């Protein structure tokens, strides 16, 4: 082991201990703001981390620790007092320091600490006697007067020194504990399902009622756990104005960014997962989407380009939109390049979604004549893979001269999803309900052939048809002879990232909430499974990766 | 006769790093301490030629430890290891009897230079 590795390991081990101690002592400090021992302990820990990180040359961690320390100095000098907002700020800063330490030790770039450092500095600059400014967090409802409050105003103590505000107490929980709790609830759901099957076969009415009641309690518990994992997206989004500004400066462009929907909450793991794709899309928008100020002026656009980043809730999904008002994607050049590589038939004009598919191919854009598009391609596959990996989809809309929009659709949580269970060739499979539109039937005779594949009509639209029987069972079976009516296809209309398609199945089994378990597909397996679940009867079912069912 | 040093810091990381720097310069580390209380105790036991002293530590900080050690041995040679932004504390430590200081993050050459100067 090299000297540097030895130090890095020592650093990591000791820093982790101190970070844990900081979290513990911060909570203790919130409980007892006068507790000097907690305050001193936090200070010593952050100070030690600062010293160690400085010695290792870990700048991000050093700066963060230094700024946390400066805030603590104000408290130690009794110039300022502890309040729950400050504890929040310090806890978040500790998280950020934790991320900085972990990513640096793992050899990755530490997350940009600017937003956190700014908040720490602002706190120090803020005059506490000034009226409370609006905070970024959701408003806390005003505490309702306690029922035993009497009309004796003269004896009420000064309000601002109450050690704990009602409604503001919280505990820090390691996300792994929530994961473990969620897994247990998942197991419980499975047990409940099996119990329900048994009771439905042979149980009394009372037993059935009790099983149903247990079921709704479990669902409520799952909801509570899911909600406790939710964090507002500003925790990630707030770093982006700086990122865009820096990217614009280095590209000699003028770019404004507008962010909306910051308060929307997402699962912590989901938020962590989408950070890199968003950074990539924003950098691309600046580097390759938005034109230089002169070019924009000639095109009759304002000199400053505009990026809109928004998060909004749509049904059980969250849609994150990254839009720029740049020149859009040069469809012709992408098409020419794609044809020359055999990625696109001669007679087909690429749709937006095909553009995305083409540009997402690793290495697509390395050709010199598409330099200006190039950045769109490099890493777009990573964006798509990451978003798909968390059960989401990517959609592209591009209009030449007007701009480019990426829509990232995400499930609210990674662990439970509603799904349609179907049987194909004797096995059960789950189709995530976020992507299913409708199940329907069609006559075999109505299937048409065009562009080298089969099509089927759904609501006056032609959908490409994928027969799961051939995809999943090596061509055996054709959807008939599995109890299906002869000549009738059982189909599910799916929509994924703006694409629609139909898949044929043997039997519709149920719609149910499934608990998703991550899953390592066997080597060489068809890349059509994203994860696995366990059915109420204890049998496994694979979850189909809709994006790969084309 | 080789010169002996007692390294005082609450972080194992820092003690290891300072120890390595000193060993490379051929200086013997005879002991380590992780708090002010321990530092005073170890100083009495080991009578080292020099002490490197961290400032912020649990169980008696570095400045109080300097006072205690100087009370015990007015000739004690103590080198303060301070972080940036602790100038005020460094001044206090020097007034308490510390001879010199180095600022973290350390330049190994700066540490060796300060140690050798104090060891004469």
Image (cartoon, coloured by chain):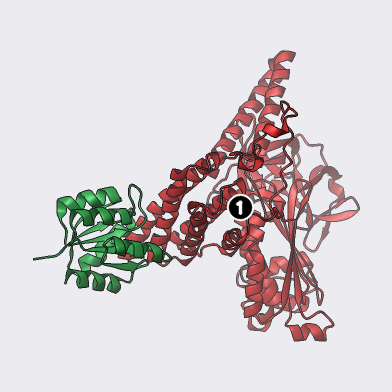
Residue at position x 51%, y 63% in the image: A110
Q: Quadrant of the C terminus of chain A?
A: bottom right
Residue at position x 38%, y 52% in the image: A14
The residue that mark 1 highlights is: A526
Chain in red in the render: A
Residue at position x 65%, y 65% in the image: A240
Q: Chain of mark 1?
A: A
Label 1: element kind: loop
Residue at position x 72%, y 18% in the image: A208
B28 horizontally vs A213: left or right: left
Seen as rendered, the residue at the extreme right is A460
Seen as rendered, the residue at the extreme front is A154
Q: Residue A68 at x, y = what percent?
A: 51, 57
Residue situated in front as seen by the camera: A423 or B111 = B111
Residue situated in front as seen by the camera: A16 or B66 = B66
In the picture, residue A325 is in which quadrant? bottom right
In the picture, residue A340 is in which quadrant? bottom right
Q: Residue A457 at x, y = what percent?
A: 87, 52
A507 horizontally vs B26: left or right: right
Please name the color used to draw chain B: green
B81 horizontally vs A241: left or right: left
Residue B120 in sight in this render: yes
In the picture, residue A332 is in which quadrant? bottom right
Residue situated in front as seen by the camera: A84 or A451 = A84
Q: Residue A487 at x, y = what percent?
A: 83, 42
């Amino acid at each position: 082991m090299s000297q540097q590795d030895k130090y890095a390991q020592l650093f990591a081990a000791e820093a982790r201990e101190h970070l844990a101690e900081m979290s513990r002592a911060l909570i203790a400090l919130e409980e007892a703001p006068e507790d000097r021992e907690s305050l001193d302990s936090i200070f010593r820990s952050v100070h030690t981390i600062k010293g160690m990180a400085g010695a290792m040359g870990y700048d991000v961690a050093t700066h963060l620790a230094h700024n946390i320390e400066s805030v603590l100095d104000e408290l130690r000098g009794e110039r300022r007092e502890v309040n729950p907002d400050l504890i929040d700020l310090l806890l978040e800063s500790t998280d950020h320091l934790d991320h900085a330490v972990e990513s640096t030790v793992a050899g990755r770039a530490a997350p940009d600490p600017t937003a956190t450092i700014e908040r720490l500095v602002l706190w120090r600059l803020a005059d506490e006697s000034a009226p409370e400014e609006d905070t970024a967090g959701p408003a806390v409802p005003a505490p309702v007067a306690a029922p035993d409050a009497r009309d004796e105003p003269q004896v009420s103590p000064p309000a601002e020194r109450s050690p704990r505000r009602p409604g503001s107490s919280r505990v820090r929980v390691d996300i792994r504990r929530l994961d473990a709790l969620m897994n247990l609830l998942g197991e419980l759901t499975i047990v409940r399902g099996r119990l329900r099957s048994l009771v439905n076969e042979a149980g009394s009415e009372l037993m059935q009622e009790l099983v149903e009641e247990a079921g709704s309690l479990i669902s409520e518990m799952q909801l509570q756990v899911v909600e406790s994992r939710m964090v507002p997206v500003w925790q990630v989004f707030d770093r982006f104005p700086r990122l865009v500004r820096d990217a614009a400066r280095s590209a000699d462009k003028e770019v404004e960014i507008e962010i909306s929907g910051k308060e929307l909450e997402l699962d912590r793991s989901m938020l962590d997962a989408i950070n890199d794709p968003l950074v990539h899309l924003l950098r691309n928008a600046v580097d390759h989407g938005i034109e230089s100020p002169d070019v924009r002026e000639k095109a009759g656009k304002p000199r400053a380009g505009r990026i809109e980043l928004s998060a909004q809730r749509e049904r059980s999904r969250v849609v994150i939109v990254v839009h720029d008002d740049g020149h859009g994607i040069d469809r012709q050049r992408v098409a020419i390049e794609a044809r020359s590589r055999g990625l696109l038939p001669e007679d087909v004009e690429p749709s937006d979604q095909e553009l995305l598919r083409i540009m997402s191919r690793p290495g697509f854009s390395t050709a010199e004549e598409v330099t200006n598009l190039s950045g769109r391609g490099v890493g777009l596959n990573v964006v798509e893979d990451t978003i798909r990996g968390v059960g989401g989809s990517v959609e592209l809309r591009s209009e030449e001269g007007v701009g480019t929009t990426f829509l990232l659709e995400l499930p609210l949580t990674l662990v439970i999803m509603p799904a349609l269970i179907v049987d194909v060739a004797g096995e059960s499979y789950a189709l995530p309900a976020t992507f299913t539109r409708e199940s329907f039937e069609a006559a075999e005779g109505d299937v048409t052939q065009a562009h080298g594949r089969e099509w089927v009509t759904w609501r006056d639209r032609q959908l490409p048809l994928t027969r799961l029987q051939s995809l999943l069972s090596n061509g055996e079976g054709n959807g008939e002879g599995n109890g299906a009516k002869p000549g009738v296809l059982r189909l599910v209309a799916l929509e994924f990232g703006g694409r629609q398609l139909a898949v044929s199945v043997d039997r519709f089994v149920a719609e149910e909430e499934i608990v998703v378990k991550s899953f390592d597909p066997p080597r060489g397996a068809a890349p059509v499974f994203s994860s696995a679940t366990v059915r109420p009867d204890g049998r496994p079912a694979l979850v189909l990766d809709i994006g790969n069912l084309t | 006769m080789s010169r002996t040093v007692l390294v005082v810091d609450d972080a194992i990381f820092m003690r290891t790093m300072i120890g390595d720097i000193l060993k490379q310069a051929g200086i013997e580390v005879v002991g380590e301490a992780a708090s002010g209380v321990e530092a005073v105790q170890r100083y009495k036991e080991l009578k080292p030629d020099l002490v490197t002293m961290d400032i912020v530590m649990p169980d008696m900080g570095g400045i109080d430890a300097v006072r205690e050690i100087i009370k015990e041995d007015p000739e004690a040679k103590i080198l303060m290891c301070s972080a940036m932004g602790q100038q005020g504390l460094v001044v206090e430590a020097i007034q308490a009897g510390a001879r010199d200081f180095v600022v973290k993050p350390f330049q190994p050459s700066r540490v060796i230079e300060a140690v050798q100067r104090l060891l004469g």
